[in-house]
Image (cartoon, rainbow, N blue to C red):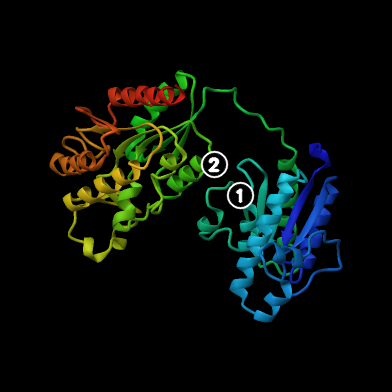
Amino acid sequence: MSQKDKSILMIGCFDTKEENFNFLRQCILSHGERVISMNTGIFGSTSLFPVELESDLVAAEAGESIEGLRKKADRGHAVEVMGKGAGKLVSRLLTEGKIKAVIGMGGGGGTYIALAAMEPLPIGFPKLCISTLATKDVSRQVGFKDIFLVPSIVDIAGLNKIISPIIMNAASAICSMSNTERIFQEKSLGVIAVSMFGNTTPCVNQATRILEERGYETMVFHANGLGGKAMEDLIRENCFIGVLDITTTELADELCGGICSAGPDRLTAASEMGIPQLVVPGCMDMVNFSHKDTVPVHFSSRQLYSWAPDVTLMRTNGDENLKLGEIMAEKLNTSIAPVKVVLPLKGLSQIDNEGGVFYNSEINRILFESIKNNLQANIKIEEVEMHINDFEFSELIANQMIKLIELEKD
């Protein structure tokens, strides 16, 4: 099926917002596009326009009946079920090649369902949601997907001079995106995932330049929690031939309750997928908190540093580093592909260098010894008298990353 023969999928609760969705549909049609409508409303539908996928089909995809949801009268449960069912239907439509873009619209419940429905769609596939929650934190629902969120400004409860032009613009945007020619870079030797923080930027910039000069494409992720989760998820989608994990600071935040935790599954995907990885304990000298008054009381006596007004860093101590070494080793020991750990003995971050505010070679040594003592013998480890941001260190790990990839190919 050619792109012009595919449809734009419109998702929403037509039982409560039929006027808005009817207008959205008309706007899309005015661009010469086809529309498939999916109703995720629990208590009814609409007679204003055709609905190809009714709510009973959506509920059934999640293993429940629409009648059962109505009788149970549990809004939270119903929203979860409809989101699950919508996601399965979207996945099927994508596999069958029937859709080229997805657009949703809603308040709290409608937004959750629309975002859940878009979750199976690959990065680069056009997806847009007009939402009353667009300016709030919906990071858990969006995940690492490239979903365009458009603030509705007012509630989605009928047409008016504010919401109408927003819907018109959103319709124009999704129609344009659905017909954009996909232009990809020339084929490289493969894509390597790289983790980065402000404190390791010089290292990452130098390493990625070397890798790209050698014919590899790099994809850099900010190790701020969401970035780490995105990297792990994409590793599981088999997007990379290698992982250069320079910045593993998210492990420290997970251990100490910092704001940049990527969850307990950080540093597990490459091991599970059998992808070569070179790992550096970059920025594990620090835990990230927000403004200084947000640092937990039990850490008030610790060494703190204001990286920015809204970023407070806490220096990890010996006990934490002992545990972090055990955690890192435990995760890497499960790998079914080549792994190498490189330890920069002169410092782990921009502020962990001689004379820097977090410099403490004794505490770093605890981390290094813990990693070495807990890693299995088959995992190679190299200690170098370099700082993480030294050019020589970047050159070393870039070249070692390539060797690991080539070793796996052999």
Tag nearer the camera, 1 or 2? 2
Q: Is residue 81 above or below residue 306?
A: below
Identified by mark 1, the residue type is Ile
Near-viewer residue (260 or 295): 260
Left or right of 37: which side holds 334? left
- The percent coordinates of residue 174 (x first, y second) are 72, 47
Q: Residue furthest left?
A: 362
- The percent coordinates of residue 95 (x first, y second) are 71, 45
Q: How many marks?
A: 2
Near-viewer residue (256 or 222): 256
**Sequence order check: which comes first, mark 1 or mark 2?**
1
Q: What numbered label is drawn on residue 94?
A: none
Alpha carbons under labels 1 and 2: distance apart: 18 Å
Q: Is residue 268 above or below residue 347?
A: below
Kindly indicate the quadrant of the structure image that contains residue 394. top left
Q: Which residue is mark 2?
A: 237
Q: Residue at x 27, y 27 (%)?
A: 390
Near-viewer residue (404 or 336): 336
Q: Is residue 107 visible?
A: no
Identified by mark 2, the residue type is Glu
Q: Residue at x 31, y 62 (%)?
A: 294
Q: Secondary structure at mark 2?
A: loop
Q: What numbered label is drawn on residue 147?
A: 1
